[in-house]
Image (spheres, rainbow, N blue to C red):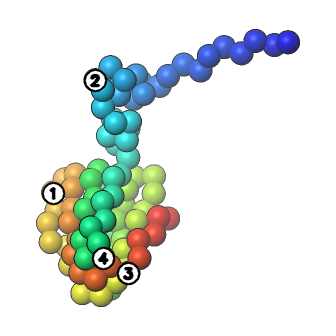
Amino acid sequence: MEKRMPRRASLPERMAAVFDLPGDVVAGLPRIELMGDNELRMENHRGILDYGSEEIHISGGKLAVRVTGEDLELRAMNQTELLITGHIRAVELE
């Protein structure tokens, strides 16, 4: 029977373990928080791809996030975080 070598943890995985951080934060993956149907917060975004009152496309690095609804508005944004308000009907990952 063949013995397998244990998989070696990647640098982000090791950093997360050493500093007791969530893996998504260390890897730079987007984090999305939906508050009811009227507020969406996103951390670790890479910019706005398309903007309108019924649809907003956001770059999340390896994936894109599409927010659809009515009266959508980008209320706040900095280099890593953004806030969208309005009547959110759907959030899709592409």
Inspect this view and state whether residue 71 appears: yes
Residue at 37% x, 23% y: name it: 17
Say which residue label 3 marks. 89
Kindly report the distance in space between the C-alpha atoms of the residues bearing marks 1 and 3: 24 Å
Inspect this view and state whether residue 47 appears: no
User: Viewer-nearest of labels 1 and 4?
Assistant: 4
> Residue 6: percent from the left, percent from the top?
62, 16
Q: For this view, does 4 lie left or right of residue 55? A: right
The earlier-in-sequence mark between 4 and 3 is: 4
Residue at 47% x, 64% y: name it: 93
Snapshot quadrant of residue 76: bottom left
The label shown at residue 78 is: 1
Q: Secondary structure at mark 4?
A: loop
Say which residue label 2 marks. 19
Crowding around mark 2 (Cα neighbors within 10 Å: few <14, some 14 to 19, many 20+) is few
Q: For this view, does 38 lie left or right of residue 69? A: left
User: Viewer-nearest of labels 1 and 2?
Assistant: 2
**Which residue type carries mark 4?**
Asp
**Which residue type carries mark 1?**
Asn
Snapshot quadrant of residue 22: top left
**Which residue type carries mark 2?**
Phe
User: Viewer-nearest of labels 1 and 3?
Assistant: 3
Residue at 38% x, 46% y: name it: 29
The earlier-in-sequence mark between 1 and 4 is: 4
